[in-house]
Structure formats: C-alpha cells, structure tokens
Image (spheres, rainbow, N blue to C red):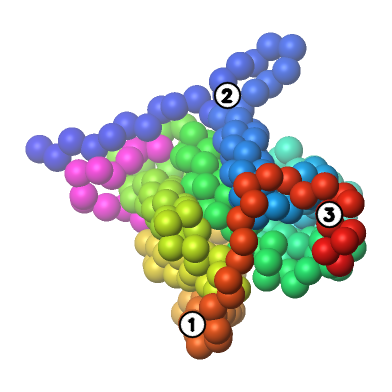
Amino acid sequence: MLQYIIWDASPIIYDGFITLRWYSLAFMIGFIVGYMIVARIFKHEGAPEEWLGTLLMWVVGATIIGARLGHVFFYEWDVYKADPIKILYVWEGGLASHGGTIGIILAVILFSIITTKRSPIWTFDRLVIAIALVGGLIRLGNLMNSEIFGHATTLPWGFMFVRSAEWHRLYPGMACHPTQIYEALCYFALFALLMWMYWKKNAEERPGLIFGVFLIGIFLPRFLIEFIKNDQVAFEATMTLNMGQWLSLPFIIGGVLLVIYAMTHPRLHLTFPNKFATPKALNNKR
C-alpha cells in the first residue's frame, strides 16, 4: 500500500499579541539574508554602503506593490474592479510573482537613474543572486500555508493538504504534487549556481550574464511546473497555457537574449577593493 505524506502543518507560528505566520517569517528571513549577501557584494566591488538602504527600500516596496497589483490585474480584475478598496487588503492573500518581478525591474531602473547613475544591468547582476534565495523561501512559505499545490499524483512523495479547503473540494483522500517544494528546490539550486558564477567565475565581468541566467532559472522551471499545478482562477481552465505560463515566456526569452548578449561582448576587467567606497571617492570616480 502506498504511503503518502499527510501535511497538517499550521501556517501560524505564534498567535498572541501579534500573529506571526511562517509565510511572513520566510519573507523577513529572505530580505535580511538577501541584504547581507548584497552588502557583501557591494563591499567586494567597492560600491557605497549608502546604496544598500536605498536599494532595500525600493525592492521591498516594489515587491509587495508589484506582486499585489500583478494578482489584481492578471488574475482577478473582475473581482477587484467591483470593489477597488479590496486591492489594499493584502493580508487576505493574493500576490503574483510575475507582478513582483515587474515591480522590481521598474524599481531597479529608477534606483539606477536616481542613485547609482550606472546601467540597471549592474544592479540586476548583483541583486538577483539574493532574489533567487528569497524566491525559494517564499515557496516554502506557500507550503506552510498549504497553497499553490499541484494535481493528484500516485508518486510516494505526494502530499495530502488536509488544512486546505481547495484540497478537500478537489482531491479528497488523494495525494497531490507538492509543487511548492519543486519550485523551492529549483530556486535554491539557482541561488547556489549564481553564487558560484559570481564568486568563483567572476561572471559579473560579463554584464547581463547573471541576470539572464536568473531569468531562465526562475521562469523556465515555473513554466514547466505549471503543467501540474492547479489553476489559480477559473478562466485558466479554457487556456492552452495558463496565465502563469504566458507571463513567464517573455522573461525566459529575455533571459536567453541577455545570455547571448553577455557571451558575445568583450569581458570587462573589474577591480575588487573589498571595502565600501567613501562619498569622496565616489564623487572623484564620477
């Protein structure tokens, strides 16, 4: 007899004066560790320490706003246009990773224009290393919420999401693909690859290469895993490819083009002072 995993984890860590959820903790850990990774990179390359706080504010705000608006406009606009005030009810759920990605892209462009005065590709090549880690942690948060799982499966590692109303409605008594774990493993592997590319292969000397590999490594697995995931909204049932897959395609194509561009242009020769730049040194460089 096949033995499946009965997933009965509580999404809440602590429920007292405040309610702390695993999903929120995953977000916080991701941003804290991500900040430390980007800080180490900036120090390695001699970028100003002052840029870190500014970049963090841009990225956190853009991630939340972009992910929320992405869900609203890509998946449930008919619902929210009838009651727009609910767009602000983020605590009720409803975040889309593609919207978060678009938000981060716009934020980095503005950060580059206003703060660094460098090409946005410079920031993307450093920032996305940390974002890959954050993406994996967020998918583990989805697992703790018993959400975004896949179709029924007879594989021995199938999960019964007994806390999910959706599971009880669609797959009572059946195990399902733990697609949250599939995606998390892909993103953690991508994080390890990007760290290796940066610290061991100096891939940052080929502008756009790390960013391109990131886009492929995030959105190609997402595109493929969507084939075994449940539709997020009803209208996707009539689509050959679901909304997540259509939204992933431009990012995959963009990633391939960036890799081609990076590998067909001369490699830069960067210096690594291993200390943050002082404002005076930065002004002199400019």
Q: Residue at x 68, y 70 (%)?
A: 121
Sequence-first tag of 3 and 1? 1
Answer whether residue 156 is magenta in the image: yes
**Residue sitting nearer the eye, 217 or 76:** 217
Sequence-first tag of 3 and 2? 2
Q: CA distance from mark 1 to mark 2?
A: 46 Å
Quarter occupied by residue 215? bottom right
Q: Nearer the viewer, mark 1 or mark 2?
A: 1
Local packing at callout 1 (Cα closer than 10 Å; few below 14, some 14-19, many 20+) is: few
Picture coordinates of residue 42 (x, y %)?
67, 50
Q: Is residue 35 above or below residue 265?
A: above
In the rendered structure, which segment of residues is drawn in magenta? Answer: 151-161
Picture coordinates of residue 213 (x, y %)?
49, 69
Local packing at callout 3 (Cα closer than 10 Å; few below 14, some 14-19, many 20+) is: few
Q: Which residue is mark 3?
A: 281
Local packing at callout 2 (Cα closer than 10 Å; few below 14, some 14-19, many 20+) is: some
Q: Which residue is mark 2?
A: 12
Q: Is residue 187 above or below residue 6?
A: below
Circles 1 and 2 in contact, beta carbons < 8 Å: no
Q: Nearer the viewer, mark 3 or mark 2?
A: 3
The quadrant of the rendering that contains the N terminus is top left
- Which amino acid type corresponds to the residue marked 2 in the rendered image? Ile
- Residue 237, numbered label: none
Q: Residue at x 28, y 44 (%)?
A: 158
- Which amino acid type corresponds to the residue marked 1 in the rendered image? Met
Q: CA distance from mark 3 to mark 1?
A: 31 Å
Q: Which residue is mark 1?
A: 263
Q: CA distance from mark 3 to mark 2?
A: 48 Å
Q: Nearer the viewer, mark 3 or mark 1?
A: 3
Answer whether residue 54 is magenta in the image: no
Q: Residue at x 14, y 40 (%)?
A: 2
